[in-house]
Image (cartoon, rainbow, N blue to C red):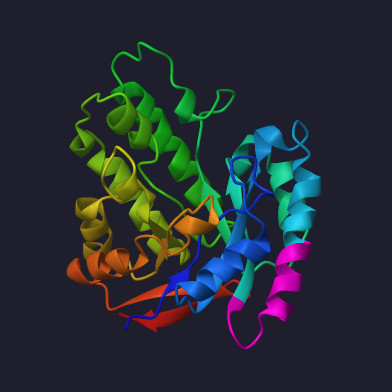
Amino acid sequence: MQTIVETHMHTHHSPDAVDTVDAICRAALAKGLRTVTITDHCDMDLWDKQGTQYTLRQSIEETRAAAERYRGRLEVLTGIELGEPLDSPDRGARALAMADYDLVICSIHSEPGLGDYYYLPDPLGDPHPLLERYFRFVLRHVEWGRFDTLAHLTYPLRYIVGDRGIPVDLRRFDDHCDAIFRALIEKGIALELNTSGWFQRYGRSLPDERLLRRYRELGGELLTIGSDAHRAGDVGRGIERGQALARAVGFTHFVYYRGRQPVRVAL
């Protein structure tokens, strides 16, 4: 049986999730997971609008309490998903100072000043200029580098390809992806294999097999695997499939983070 470690999940302290930290932990135990990292959202554009500071503190406190409650049965680690931290570096710094996190995820859900890609205009038109801006913005964050793993690269494709059915020639952005991968490798930052896309209309991991293989070819070794669960029932979903994909493209191990240091798990 494979070791199942979850590095990306959300509780009711994220605006788009519903279950408590305890419910997440109980689900993880029932599914045989060994380690979970609670990574509630901290999006810069919501810092003041939806009480993000308060809910983040609550998430941290409840996660720490759960770590004690489940000690010896389930390792419960404290994380955060920073959304677009360069939108407001000051807010990002304040969020990072709120706890001694085990894992800091960086994610790009939107362009500066615009809403989440979930709310793309209709009709969208040619998506390639949007993706050009997206990949450039991602690279800026990797160059900033104050995080441990880069979440769900190719995130906009959930909505462009998956929801809208608009074809995208992703190979047009291979140079951008190579630059991102090389910057991750140089800085010792992990890439995330996000399994959620398999269970959405998009139907692929984020990023997909071709890009994961390219990251490995360039020398990438640090890979986290997360379900991006927003409810207890999805905890661990696709993790074993993600491990199999990682092996298939050449990885010998994946990592999770404790005290912001990578812990290697053999595949």
The quadrant in which the C terminus is found is bottom left
Q: In the rendering, at what x and y percent does residue 134 appear?
A: 42, 33
The quadrant in which the N terminus is found is bottom left
Please tell me whether residue 69 belongs to the stretch shown in magenta: yes
The answer to whether residue 166 is above or below residue 232 is above
The answer to whether residue 181 is above or below residue 172 is below
Residue shown at 59%/23% (left/top)? 113
Query: Which is more toward the observer, 217 or 201?
Result: 201
Please tell me whether residue 162 belongs to the stretch shown in magenta: no
Report the residue that reaches farthest toward the bottom. Answer: 72
Choose top left, top right, bottom left or bottom right for residue 239.
Answer: bottom left
Q: In the rendering, at what x and y percent does residue 234 appear?
A: 46, 56
Question: Would residue 56 be found to the left or right of residue 210 on screen?
Answer: right
Residue shown at 19%/52% (left/top)? 210
Q: Quick check: can you spot residue 219?
A: no
Query: Which is more toward the observer, 3 or 217?
Result: 3
Number of callouts? 0
Question: Would residue 113 be found to the left or right of residue 135 on screen?
Answer: right
Segment tinted magenta in the rendering: 61-75
Question: Would residue 172 be found to the left or right of residue 201 on screen?
Answer: left
Choose top left, top right, bottom left or bottom right for residue 45.
Answer: top right
Most common SS among magenta residues: helix
Residue shown at 41%/49% (left/top)? 152
Q: In the rendering, at what x and y percent does residue 28 appear?
A: 52, 70
The answer to whether residue 169 is above or below residue 260 is above
Q: Quick check: can you spot residue 184?
A: yes
Question: Would residue 95 be found to the left or right of residue 30 on screen?
Answer: right
Residue shown at 34%/55% (left/top)? 181
Query: Which is more toward the observer, 179 or 245?
Result: 245
